[in-house]
Image (cartoon, helix red, strand yellow):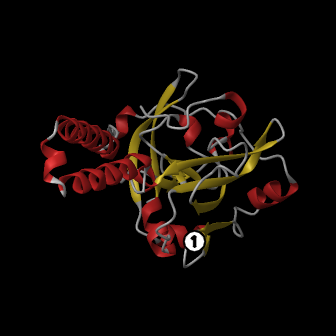
Amino acid sequence: MSEFARRSVLLGAAALGAGACSRFAESDAGSDLFDRAEDWHRAAHRALAGRQRLAPEYAPDQRSPDVRGNGSVTVDTPEYRSALADGFADWRLAVTGLVDNPLSLSLADLRALPQRTQITRHDCVEGWSAIAEWKGPQLGVLLDRARIRPEAGFIVFRCADSLYGERYYESVDLVDAYHEQTIIAHELNGEPLPEKNGAPLRMRIERQLGYKHAKYLTAIEAVASFEDIGKGKGGFWEDQYGYQWYAGI
C-alpha cells in the first residue's frame, strides 16, 4: 500500500472514530477535523487517480531513429560478457523478498507470459527524450504469481551494472508497480533489447523519469521499507546525488 493510500485509510479511521461521538462531531473542533480529513481524502484520491492514468502512447511512425544509451551502457564483468555472448540463455530474473512464492524466471519464461507492447516517450532528467516501442510482461503479473505479502509496500529492482563503484538499484511503490504500463521490457522496436539499453531486461515505468527505469535487471524484491537498502533513499541517484525518489512526469 502506498503512502497516499495509508494516509487515506488512517484519516478514514480517524473520521469514523470521531463520528462515534456525536457531541464531538457537532463541536467546532470536530467539524474542523472532518473538514481536514475530507480535504486529505480528496488530495489522496486525486494523487492516486493521477498516477493511474496512462502515459501517452504513439504511432509506429513517430518512433525516434535511435534510443541513446545513458548512464551504464554495458556491464563490465566477465559474467555479463559471457551471458551476452551466449544470448542470455542462462539469464535468470528472481522475484524475492516478502513473497510466498519466490520465482526464478528465464527469458523464455518471461516471453511465455502475456505480453504488453507500448510505444511511449522516454524522458531523461538531462533534458532529452525518445519515442520507442517496448515489449514485455506487466510487472503486476509477476507480483501476483509470486503472491506478495500484505506487509510489502515497495518493489526494489536489483541490477547487474554499477556506477562509480556502487551497484545500481531503484524502487517504486505498489501504485506504480501495478500500473498497466509498468512492464519488464525484453524488446525495443521489435528486436531483443540492445546492450546499451539494458539487455536483456529493463524496467519501463512510464509515468516516471528515465532514471527510475532500471536496466540489466537481475532481481525484483518486495520489501516493507528501503531504509536498510543502500543509503535508504530508494535508488542509486537518490542515494548518491539527492534525486527525488518519486520522479513523476
Asked if one can make out residue 137 in the rendered structure from this viewpoint, the answer is: no
Q: Residue furthest right?
A: 78
Q: Position of residue 200 (x, y in %)?
A: 64, 55
**Foreground residue, 245 or 63?**
245
Q: Position of residue 50 (x, y in %)?
A: 30, 39
Q: Is residue 209 left or right of residue 52?
A: right
Q: Position of residue 227 (x, y in %)?
A: 65, 49
Q: Position of residue 193 (x, y in %)?
A: 59, 50
Asked if one can make out residue 27 in the rendered structure from this viewpoint, the answer is: yes
In the picture, the quarter occupied by the C terminus is: top left
Q: Is residue 214 left or right of residue 47?
A: right
- Classify mark 1: residues with Cα within 10 Å, few (<14), some (14-19) or many (20+): few
Q: Which residue is mark 1?
A: 108
In the picture, the quarter occupied by the N terminus is: bottom left
**Foreground residue, 131 or 174?**
174
Please name the residue shown 14% across and 48% down the image.
23
Decide: is 179 above or below 124. Answer: below
Q: Is residue 165 left or right of residue 179?
A: right
Q: Residue furthest top?
A: 127
**Foreground residue, 172 or 30?**
30
Please name the residue shown 60% across and 76% down the image.
102
Amino acid type assigned to the residue bearing label 1 in the image: Ala
Decide: is 231 above or below 180. Answer: above
**Foreground residue, 228 or 58?**
228
Indicate the secondary structure of the residue bearing disc 1.
Answer: helix
What is the quadrant of residue 21 in the picture? bottom left
